[in-house]
Every structure is written in C-alpha cells, then in structure tokens.
Image (tube, rainbow, N blue to C red):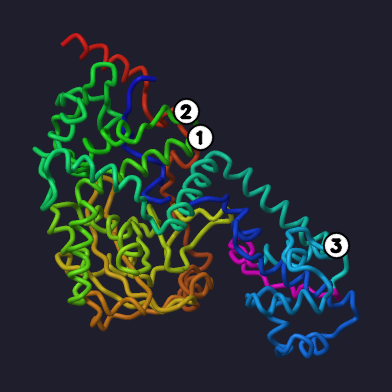
C-alpha cells in the first residue's frame, strides 16, 4: 500500500500509550519488578517447611512478626538487606528466594487466587475477600481459581469484537506510563525539522507548517472531494499531500498536515495489525505536538511558570496558539521529564464515559477486567464530571478530590465537539499542587469509587421510591455490536482512496 491516511474516528483510541498485557500485569509483576505475592508465599512455604513460627523467624532476622506477616501476605516490599537475611535463615540462595516458580501446586493456587482477588475484575463484583490460608482445602482453592478462569473466559467471549482495540489501547497506555509519556527520539526529529526551516520560537504558523512539508519534498493540494473517512491522504508516489478545503472545527489544519508528515518522517510502514495502527497514530500525534510546541521553548515556558507557581494549561494554550486538548497532552509529555511533576489526563464525554486517559501519578481510573480504561464511566464526583455543571465556561474549573488512593487537585474545562460536549482535565497529586494557579480553590469533593455506594448505586431514598417503577429506553449505539473495521487502516474505504488518488494524479 503506497499511501498514508488518517482515519476520522478511532473507536475509543486516544493519546494513550504501555508494555505488557493488562492481564499479565495484573497476574504478576512487570519485568524487573518484585512479585510481592509470590515472594510472600515462598517465604511462608520455606518457613513452615523448617517448622518455624513467625516469632521464630522474626527473632533471627531482627524484625517484628507483624512486618513479616505483611511480607508473607504480599503487602510489604522488603529491603534488600532483609531479603538477604531471610534467604540465609531459610537456607536458600537469594535467587531461589526471588525465583518465579512457585514452590508447590498449592502455593501456585494461593498466589493466583490472591492476585485475582486484588484485580479489577474481582473487585468489580463487590464480593467479600476470601482469606487465603492453610485452612482452605485444595478443593476450595481449585474451585475458586477455576471459577475465576471461567468468568474471565466468558467475559472475553462476550467482548470479543472490541477486545483487540481495548487490549491494544491498554498496552499503549502502559508504554506511555513506563516512559512518563516522553519520547526523546521523536523530540529530536521534530527539533531537526524546526531547525531546518529556521523556526525556534513562538506559535508555528500555517506558513511554517507548509515550509516543513516543502522541506520534506511534498506538495500540498487542497481539494473538495477528500474521501469521507479520511482527514488527509498522502500520495508517496508523487509526493503530494491532499487536504480538505473545508474548515472542520474539530481538527487543527496544522495538526492534520503535521500528522500526515509524521508517518513519513517516522518511517511508518503499512500497519501489521490494529495495535501497530494505533501505535503509529499515537506517535504521529506526539510528532505533531513536538512541532507545534517545541520542546526547548515549551520547557522554558513551563519552568518559568513553575518558578512563579503559576502553571496553567490555558496559558500554554495561548502561548503556542493550540487547542486546550493539545496543550494538556503536551504538558503530560514534559511535566514529569522536565519538571518532576507526575500527572494524569482525562477526556470525558458529557455522558461520563472516558474517551482518552493517561496517568503516571497513581490515580485510580476505573478499568474493566482487561485493564482497559476507555469506555468506562468515571466517578461523578471527580473534576472531569463536576465541570459539566459549572455555569462559567470561560475559565478553568479547579477542584480537590479526596480518593481512596490520595487527594488530587484537577483543573478542567469543557469543549464542544461534533459528537457532543467533552471535559478535558489535568490532575496532579496534592504534593504538586503548589506549582499551579488555582490551588487556592475552595471546591472539594470526595470519591469512594470503586465502592459501589459512591455513585454507581442510587441513593436509598430514590431507590425506595423508584426501584421497580422506572423503565428507561436505552440509547443503544450500533457500533457497540459491530466488529472492528477490517483492513490495514480500520474504518477507511481503500477503494475510495485509490480512486481518489487515480483521479487526482491526472490533474
């Protein structure tokens, strides 16, 4: 296939980038990380094999029995010195103590059940936690673990059509989180291009964007018959980029052009699968933002604002003449790498459904059993939901939210899109709020999610009056039942694109 194009809609895909499958991440530690549950079970197995009590072991390694109990239950990560003491007393090498292989079939079942109960699927069921101990018979362990496997299988079967998209999105998000959403190799390529066209400060104009295209050897052609499923079409054979005449308010024309060039600069080939397609889309988004908001100039701007304790997304937007969403995304690229600030981003539809999300600050986003966030309903007490009720749409809305994993300060605003109203929010842990304008807000809420009593279960008074007396007619979207679009570029009619290129080649 000899063209690059950009699909208009991406089935809940967004600026979300990760590395291992969500289920693998839930079931075990990521590469290079300590599997706390497996370690704890191994310590317990070796201790009991030697006929030692917790008191016996604690006396020999010099730590409290309560601390050892936390280690054995996978709730505390021991220091390296303690691990060495434990290995010595238990008569094994450190490698054996940290080994991945469970010491017995029973230990393997205990580890799997413990991990399952701490995962999002089990927690979403609202069931009590079973205490994993020696009192549980092998039959009960086999049964509980088997039920977990069957439930996962049935859920996978029910959601088989969007499964690939959800898993690909989750993997990309994990990649993004592991890199703090910062890609120095793309930054360097963008910087080289900006240097080549002599741009280093201020907003990137349409004229400079066209200069970049010319520098790369492409002619720009504005047409009125661009295939309806595309934002742009790149003809690599004749080095032409076709863009629309129309002013589609949903997309910055500069971004559309720069994303098209990004496929070329980054050396993308025809996507092998949906995950590859999604990854390319994310990288070209990043590339375009790196040109619209150059790293050096943006970091200087952010550093100055941080020093003044006046960080604000709307100021970044105004300084570089980009959309609020682009400014928010770019902040996540640079905040951790250059400012030492962990953060999270959400784009939420007015219905409360998460459209895009990213975090590296530990915020507890809702997730399904695969780890997917997009498509989940966000807590109605979070800033990204509360902002829809704020009458002042001109200024950003700021709020503190107390959650099960800590207090977060978030700033948000809403924007109208052809598919409805969306909120765009950036949040940081309480420890980082001192750098932001709006930290003096008196708005505060509390979220107990994922506890169903927080916002998923109706208040008792309303339930008492209306339970059994209400029958809503659901607004069902046909795309929820559809399989993923086929082809290397999902959702794009290749015949339409080829006919378009053939027709314009003669002009």
Determine which residue is flagged by label 1.
483
Residue neighbourhood size for the residue with mark 2, other residues' Cα within 10 Å, grouped as few (<14), some (14–19), many (≥20): few
Q: Residue 179: where, in percent of width, then height?
A: 43, 56
Q: Which residue is mark 2?
A: 486
Q: CA distance from mark 3 to mark 2?
A: 45 Å
Query: Foreground mark, 1 or 3?
Result: 3
On screen, residue 459 versus residue 394, left or right, reads right
**Which sits in the foreground, 59 or 400?**
59
Residue range of the region highlighted in magenta in the rendering: 118-135
Q: Residues within 10 Å of mark 3 (few under 14, many from 20)?
A: few
Q: Residue at x 31, y 31 (%)?
A: 264
Q: Earlier in the sequence, mark 1 or mark 3?
A: 3
Q: Name the element at disc 3.
A: loop
Q: Mark 3 sits on what residue?
A: 104
Question: Which mark is in front, 1 or 2?
Answer: 2
Label 3 vs 2, first from the N-terminus: 3
Q: From the viewer's perspective, is 494 left or right of 290?
A: right
């Amino acid at each position: 296939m000899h063209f690059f194009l950009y699909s208009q809609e991406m089935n809940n895909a967004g600026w979300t980038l990760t590395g291992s499958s969500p289920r693998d991440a839930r079931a075990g530690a990521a590469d290079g990380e300590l599997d706390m549950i497996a370690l704890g079970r191994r310590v317990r197995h070796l201790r009991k094999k030697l006929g030692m009590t917790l008191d016996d072991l604690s006396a020999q390694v010099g730590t409290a029995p309560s601390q050892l109990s936390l280690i054995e239950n996978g709730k505390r990560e021991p220091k390296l010195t303690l691990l060495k003491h434990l290995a010595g007393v238990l008569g094994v090498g450190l490698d054996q103590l940290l080994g991945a292989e469970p010491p017995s079939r029973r230990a393997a079942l205990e580890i799997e059940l413990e991990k399952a109960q701490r995962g999002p699927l089990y927690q979403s069921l609202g069931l009590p936690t079973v205490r994993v101990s020696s009192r549980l018979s092998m039959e009960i362990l086999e049964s509980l673990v088997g039920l977990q496997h069957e439930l996962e299988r049935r859920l996978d079967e029910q959601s088989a059509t969007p499964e690939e998209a959800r898993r690909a999105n989750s993997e990309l998000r994990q990649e993004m989180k592991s890199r703090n959403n910062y890609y120095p190799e793309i930054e360097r390529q963008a910087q080289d291009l900006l240097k080549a066209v002599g741009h280093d400060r201020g907003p990137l104009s349409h004229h400079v964007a066209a200069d970049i295209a010319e520098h790369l050897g492409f002619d720009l052609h504005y047409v009125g018959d661009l295939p309806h499923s595309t934002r742009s079409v790149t003809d690599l054979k004749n080095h032409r980029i076709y863009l629309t005449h129309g002013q589609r308010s949903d997309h910055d024309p500069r971004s559309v052009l720069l994303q098209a060039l990004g496929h070329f600069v980054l050396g993308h080939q025809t996507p092998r699968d949906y995950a590859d397609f999604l990854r390319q889309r994310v990288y070209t988004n990043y590339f375009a933002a790196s040109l619209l908001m150059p790293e050096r100039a943006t970091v200087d701007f952010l550093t100055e604002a941080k020093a003044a304790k006046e960080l604000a997304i709307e100021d970044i937007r105004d300084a570089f003449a980009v959309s609020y969403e682009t400014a928010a995304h770019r902040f996540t690229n640079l905040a951790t790498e250059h400012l030492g600030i962990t953060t999270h981003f959400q784009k939420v539809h007015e219905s409360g459904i998460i459209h895009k999300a990213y975090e590296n600050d530990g915020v507890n986003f809702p997730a399904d059993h695969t780890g997917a966030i997009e498509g989940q309903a966000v807590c109605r007490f979070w800033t990204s939901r509360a902002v829809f009720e704020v009458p002042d749409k001109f200024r950003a809305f700021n709020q503190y939210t107390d959650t099960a994993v800590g207090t977060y300060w978030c700033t948000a605003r809403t924007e109208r899109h052809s598919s409805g109203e969306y909120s765009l929010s950036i949040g940081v842990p309480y420890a980082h709020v001192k750098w932001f304008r709006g930290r003096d807000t008196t708005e505060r809420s509390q979220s107990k999610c994922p506890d169903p009593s927080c916002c998923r279960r109706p208040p008792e008074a309303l339930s008492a009056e209306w339970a059994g007396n209400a029958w809503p007619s659901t607004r069902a979207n046909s795309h929820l039942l559809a399989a993923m679009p086929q082809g290397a570029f999902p959702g794009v009619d290749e015949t339409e694109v080829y006919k378009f290129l053939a027709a314009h080649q003669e002009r």
